[in-house]
Image (cartoon, helix red, strand yellow):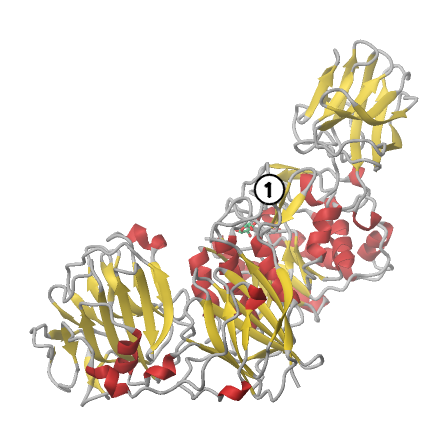
Amino acid sequence: MTHPTPAPAPGPSRRAVVSALGALPLAGAVGPALTAAPARAAEAALPLPVAHWAFDEGAGTTAADSSGRGRALTLAEGARWGAAKSGAAALDLSAGGSASAAGAVVDTSGSFSVAAWVRLTAVAGYQTFVSVDGLAVSGFYLQLRDDTGVFAFTRLPLDATSANGGAAVAGAACAPVTGAWYHLLGVDDAAAGVLRLYVNGVLEGEVPYSGGWRATGATAVGRGLFGGAHVDQTHGLIDDVQVFDTALTAADAAALAGVPAGSTEPLLTVDTTRPGPRLSAELGGIFFEDINHSGEGGLYAELVNNRSFMAAATPLHWSATGGAVLAVDPGQPLNHALTQSLRVTAKAAGDGVANEGFWGIPVRPSTAYRAGLYAKSADSTGTLTVALTGSDGTVHASGTAGPLTGSWRKYTLTLRTAPGAPTTADARLTLTASTPGTLWLSQVSLFPPTYKGRANGLRVDLMEKLAALQPKFLRFPGGNYLEGNVVADRFDWKKTIGPVEQRPGHRNSAWGYWSTDGLGLPEYLQMTEDLGCLPLLCVYAGYSLQGAHVTGDALKPFVQDALDQIEYITGPATSPWGARRAADGHPKPFPLKYVEIGNEDGFDRSGSYEERYAAFHDAIKARFPALRLIATTPVSSRPYDLIDEHYYQSPAAFQAGSHKYDQRDRDSPKVFVGEWAAQEGRPTPDLNAALGDASWLAGLIRNSDQVLMESYAPLFSHVRDNTWATNLIAYDALTSYNSPSYYAQQLLLTHRGDVVLPTAVRALPGLNVVTTHDPRTRRVHLAVVNTTGTARRTTVTLRGVARTAPSAVVTVLAGPGTQATNTLTDPLAVAPRTGTVNGVAPTFTATFAPYSVTVLEVRTG
Ligand code: AHR
């Protein structure tokens, strides 16, 4: 997108009115073409500035204040004179420097406005054009921001660097380019409690702000103050800076910028004549790692907690029933992998054990559960009653395992609940001995029906939620889970294949619980097939979270592990590791296109990633040249196909960050935004976060030639283990729900075309937009995120479209306020609604509801 230049609006005959999903009453057709008010008329009414530097001197080190108040600026440190926007000269800071006057020229605790012309020679980094110093930070910043890439008028709530997180940022609608003059006007309207930013006379940013405080330090042009230091050097020209002790109006803004007032009305223009990039085929994916009991007690459908008794030296999650005595017994291993078992000493018939599951075991009517266990008894006698038992002792389903013998035997049985059984998570799995004596248990397992009926499979409701996102890839198995706190706790894939009772499991030290590795490499791969998406494999690359890093010869086995892992996934069934995959039930190779080397290796302070990446790169490219490699932090000695960038930020930062990739150097390495999420809401994001997420995602889609793939993180949280606060989907033992952010992403990613269409927004602060086109169906998908509490009504023009169908499908996700959210008990409080709107035309008027994500699907031609 570019900052729009004023254009005449089309005539009235082709105009119509649409109110998105009837969220607001339909208004009458808007009037004829926007009329251009003469700029000079508005200019005449402008308030007088309290400081005005025209920078017309062209020589010397002083810039006079033409307001008559005598606040001359002194040029310092390389500040020069350059070519003017208006008058004879401008302040040239392209070689550094700034200009300042002692003391504040305006009282920043009340209403005020600051205007400047700027022309940049670089668009990177923070650059502040006008500011007044406080003690630690500036009282305001009229600036270009590095985090968002756009112009902004910014204020912090306090004169403290630590207050930066609460900054109010009125940001521009799109990123600037070098070499063009922009007129910026920042307005602090203390009476209305808002900050506004006008660019070229057009209102582009508007945010609430009521924390006005008085900055009393120097007034500076060309820099700001942060952490008590001079920062934010401007690179470029600044001209005609004016400061007012009042909140200027929209008409003032137009007059100052020299544009007709009528040309600053809201307008949304989609240009179908200049199609932008094609959407990457792999743009929307999912990232799964076992965090917050996402796998164990979550997606992995196993209902027994600590089924293998390997989690600890005590029988965690198990309890004795009757008078039984329990002990974890390392002296009676099931096999080389499960080196501990549970010894149960039954003092009487009816004594036994119970497993509490993952915060309860879910029971439903008319359901068949598959139970399995290994057992043996000291005296080769007796049986076990295996039952789903309510906390009040009600038996919901039961069966018998036995007779037990003196050596390990596997017993499998089906537990069926009756049609009248309750739906409850208030149950346990109980195993009751028929006779007194000592017995041992191992690998005690219970599965409900699974997604697609897979043995050792996945939870149905959670997989259905993932499938409804239509993901293009699955990034797995982490994240920090891949790395472990120490090398021994990494995801050691070779221990996650084969029969589940031969997988030892490992400590999930990153997230604080035991992993049975029942959800292992074969299950992840099956999951991709069941979701119809590509696997995106993250290989352990010799770095663990507490800083251990493996280099030199010691790294070679890890590189070999990665090669073997790729062969397990892609090799023919005749290859050594392909044969292991076939033995695990999947003779056909899986398609693999992307391999990520490690995770967040920028945290490796030793700097060893350069060497580690090179070792993996060389080995993988030599053996599997077609694979595309993803680096987790930039490296210089070897190429990478993509760089994985992770962003966890505030909703405001994401709302403002929609333009981050707009001005990216198109020749730099392509990006995989492998983890991102606006951090607000627990265990799932609220609507405010969803609006941030939708704004950010709109930016990723717009820049799909740069950002080839993206995945939100984390995906899941059990409501009883919310270690990581904000997650896409949450659940308890029985039910689950989608967050507002889930719905926002689903909306943007599943209602889209193949080609991005350039879209300009004018005077629509807080709106982030992406438009795509499906040439096959001739549908234009206009996605609009309104992050503000104000309904935004605008003319929409589809440039280059002669005809449209008169009605369009519209889907809206909205809520009553930023804190609105979904919960287990109110899962659809914020959910999309779909309807039809009439009166669509090549130019029409639409209203976008407060706090909403809207996708309008318009049929053209
Ligand atoms: O998504 C949660 C964690 O955040 C991931 O494990 C890690 O990669 C990142 O730091």
Q: Is residue 748 above or below residue 299?
A: below
Which residue has dot 1 on it? 292
Q: Secondary structure at mark 1?
A: loop
Q: Is residue 53 left or right of residue 187?
A: left
Q: Position of residue 416 (x, y in %)?
A: 86, 33
Question: Image quarter for residue 836?
Answer: bottom right
Which amino acid, mark 1? Asn
> Which residue occupies the extreme right position in the image?
403
Whether residue 219 is visible to the viewer of this picture, yes or no, is yes
Question: Image quarter for residue 591?
Answer: bottom right
Q: Nearer the viewer, residue 278 or 274?
A: 274
Mark 1, residues whose alpha carbon is within 10 Å: few (<14), some, or many (≥20)?
A: many
Q: Is residue 43 above or below residue 335?
A: below
Q: Nearer the viewer, residue 540 or 413?
A: 413
Q: Residue at x 47, y 79 (%)?
A: 30
Q: Is residue 72 left or right of residue 840?
A: left
> Which residue occupies the extreme front position in the image?
28
Q: Residue at x 79, y 45 (%)?
A: 450
Q: Quadrant of the C terminus?
A: bottom right
Q: How many marks?
A: 1
Q: Is residue 63 left or right of residue 518?
A: left
Q: Residue at x 53, y 88 (%)?
A: 13
Q: Nearer the viewer, residue 43 or 164?
A: 43
Q: Position of residue 481 (x, y in %)?
A: 61, 47
> Which residue occupies the extreme top position in the image?
347
Q: Is residue 357 above or below residue 854?
A: above
Q: Position of residue 734 (x, y in %)?
A: 70, 38
Whether residue 330 is visible to the viewer of this picture, yes or no, is no
Q: Is residue 43 above or below residue 599?
A: below
